[in-house]
Image (cartoon, rainbow, N blue to C red):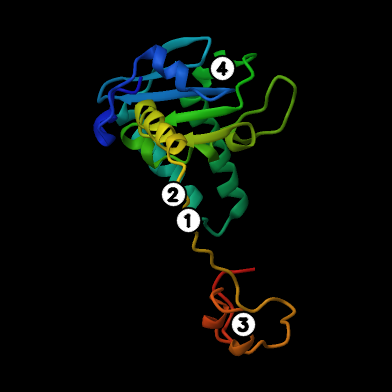
Amino acid sequence: PGRKRGSVLGAEAIDLAGTRLHLPDGAALLEYLLGERAGFLFIVTRQDALVVPVPSMEDLAEQILLFRGLLERRGPDPDSDERAIRTLGVKLHKTLIGPARVLAGQGINHLIISPDQMLNFLPFEALVVPVGAEGEAPHYLAEDYEITLAPSMTVLAKLRSAQLSDATERTLAAFADPIPTPAPPAISSEAATPGTGEALLPVGLPPLPYSL
């Protein structure tokens, strides 16, 4: 795992031992490799490593596009759309996440998913976990796991190493609604503290679009 797209950052591809070393606590790597006639899923945790077959790119493409379409464009019948999303979401979950059921009992709460081909267009977080053995209701995969998407484990390890070694301060640009609710009395720009940037904010600006 980690050899595909590993050259994006000029990183040396890591092997299985390196993959396990870079896995965060409680994390599992799910790395997909799709071909025209077959597909494979590499599952790696700190305890296990295995490869399982998954459908080919051709077999998955139509389902992925349909699932995205259902999520993005709701029709006049919301109940029917919801049933269709649940049905297809469960099917995709069974196909793509189901093989990782071997992770049960390992305390996994974080999935690092490395998609391939059409899987880059699939919102894994919205896959639907079916009714379980304990009778819990169907729910989204994101309700069970923290989900991280990465081109490969090699790239993710490179980025994590860069973050840990970069201790320099960074500049933050923050945006917020300039008119709180309720709005306080107007403050003249002359009263603003020099050097804080407050003097650059004119009084009476309209609300920031989409702010709450």
Nearer the observer: mark 3 or 4; the answer is: 3
In this view, the residue in front, 117 or 208, is 208
Task: Identify the residue position indicated by label 1 in the image.
Answer: 73
Q: Which mark is residue 69?
A: 2
Of mark 2 and mark 3, the one earlier in the sequence is 2
Nearest the eye: 142 or 167: 167
Point 65% across, 13% down: residue: 105
The mark that comes first in sequence, 3 or 4, is 4
Residue 88 shows in this picture: no
First-in-chain label (2 vs 4): 2
Q: Using a 10 Å C-alpha cutoff, classify the residue at mark 4 as few (fewer than 14 neighbours), some (14 to 19) or many (20 or more).
A: few
Callout 4, which amino acid?
Arg
Label 2 with label 3: CB-CB less than 8 Å: no
Amino acid bearing label 1: Arg
Is 132 placed above or below 178 here? above
- CB under 8 Å between callouts 2 and 1? yes
